């Protein structure tokens, strides 16, 4: 909750918005103004990604509740307290690591603002965890082709959905980046068309569009009347209920996820699949063809090649093949 107060500046009334005490973790609220300042700087000043902010806020609040229950003040927290807190969590190892990362960054800010002397979370360790393969289910190439083939492209919605799924497959883009596409982000550069994606952490990447996909997108734009739409207008738009008329509203990543579930159901495919499944398929397919890992990493927009390897399902296929050959 936010409370608003008014301040007169130069004869004018200016509204100021400040966080109410009830929004602060109790551990911070009881530690004074310096702790509150450090907490707000940590949460709203240093963390720019809203999803990270939400996750870190949850982690700090949960740790705060644990300390308050045991009557441990902020300045008396030790590495042993942080370790006991992590041991008490009935969550997966990656989640426990996320909470520890949040506490480390949080206490770093408290140390910088001289609220506490040392960071009690800095020396704490969690269990080792090495993800060999991601959890995202893979859609096979055969099923991806079947999905595209089942889309009725005789109307605007079918053409729109076919273009979205085509982009997910042939660019390996995240669905969030596809949802952000504007009309000006699809353009011709020389003899080929390109898509400009605005991705996580402010990254902007230009991906060439293969010939058949460019025809699919051009067909969608021409029939929907968006070929000469305003440059900043959304490339993909929602519909008016069950009508086949497009609105002026942006189609969000959640909208695209729900659209894909409907298309999967229509094609008789598993609805466990998601837009992210296309990234798995595309990355695995390119690596299987011998494309260098560095090139696939760039296409996927990964900062670390280890992340790209998590999408590689080639070893999973070999393992399944070996299992099926057991004679018992």
Image (tube, rainbow, N blue to C red):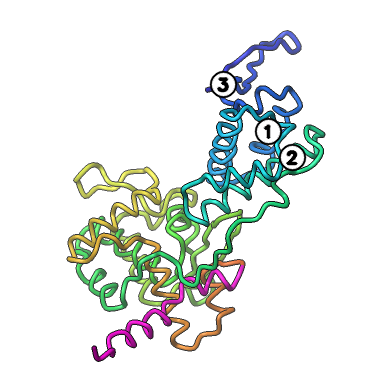
**Label 3 CA crowd tier, 10 Å (few <14, some 14–19, many 20+):** few
Q: Residue at x 55, y 64 (%)?
A: 129
Q: How far across and down, in percent of the image, does residue 200 sit? A: 56, 55
Q: Residue at x 64, y 43 (%)?
A: 82
Which of the numbered marks, if any, corresponds to residue 39? Answer: 1
**Label 2 CA crowd tier, 10 Å (few <14, some 14–19, many 20+):** many
Which of the numbered marks, if any, corresponds to residue 109? Answer: 2
CB atoms of marks 3 and 2 within 8 Å: no
Provide the residue designation for mark 3.
Answer: 22
**Label 1 CA crowd tier, 10 Å (few <14, some 14–19, many 20+):** many
- From what the image shows, is residue 327 above or below residue 47? below
Q: How far across and down, in percent of the image, does residue 264 sit? A: 23, 62
Q: Which residues, given as a range, are shown in magenta?
A: 304-328
Mark 3 vs 2, N-terminal side: 3
For label 3, the SS is helix
Q: Along the line of sight, which residue is nearer the eye, 314 or 132?
A: 132
241 relative position to 97: left or right: left
Q: Along the line of sight, which residue is nearer the eye, 182 or 134?
A: 134
Q: CA distance from mark 1 to mark 2?
A: 7 Å
- Asked whether residue 327 is drawn in magenta, I would say yes
115 relative position to 206: left or right: right
Outermost residue, top side: 11
Q: Residue at x 19, y 46 (%)?
A: 243
Mark 3 vs 1, N-terminal side: 3
């Amino acid at each position: 909750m936010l409370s608003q107060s008014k301040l007169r500046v130069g004869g004018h009334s200016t509204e100021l918005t400040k966080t109410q005490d009830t929004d602060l973790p109790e551990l911070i609220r009881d530690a004074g103004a310096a702790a509150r300042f450090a907490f707000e700087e940590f949460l709203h000043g240093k963390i720019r990604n809203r999803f990270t902010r939400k996750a870190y806020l949850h982690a700090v609040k949960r740790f705060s509740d644990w300390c308050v229950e045991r009557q441990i003040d902020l300045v008396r927290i030790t590495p042993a307290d942080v370790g006991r807190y992590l041991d008490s969590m009935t969550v997966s190892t990656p989640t426990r690591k996320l909470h520890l990362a949040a506490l480390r960054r949080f206490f770093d800010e408290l140390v910088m603002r001289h609220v506490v002397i040392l960071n009690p979370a800095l020396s704490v360790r969690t269990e080792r965890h090495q993800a060999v393969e991601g959890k995202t289910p893979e859609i096979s190439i055969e099923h991806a082709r079947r999905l595209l083939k089942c889309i009725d492209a005789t109307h605007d919605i079918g053409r729109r959905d076919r273009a979205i799924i085509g982009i997910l497959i042939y660019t390996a883009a995240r669905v969030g980046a596809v949802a952000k596409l504007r009309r000006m982000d699809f353009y011709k550069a020389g003899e080929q068309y390109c898509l400009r994606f605005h991705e996580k952490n402010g990254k902007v990447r230009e991906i060439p569009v293969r010939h058949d996909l460019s025809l699919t997108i051009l067909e969608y734009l021409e029939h929907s009347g968006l070929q000469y739409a305003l440059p900043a207008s959304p490339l993909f738009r929602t519909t008016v209920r069950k009508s086949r008329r497009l609105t002026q509203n942006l189609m969000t990543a959640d909208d695209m996820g729900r659209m894909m579930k409907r298309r999967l159901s229509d094609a008789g495919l598993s609805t466990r699949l998601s837009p992210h499944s296309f990234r798995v398929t595309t990355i695995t397919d390119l690596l299987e063809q011998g494309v260098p890992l560095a090139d696939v990493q760039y296409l996927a927009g990964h900062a670390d090649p280890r992340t790209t390897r998590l999408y590689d399902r080639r070893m999973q296929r070999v393992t399944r093949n070996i299992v099926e050959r057991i004679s018992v």
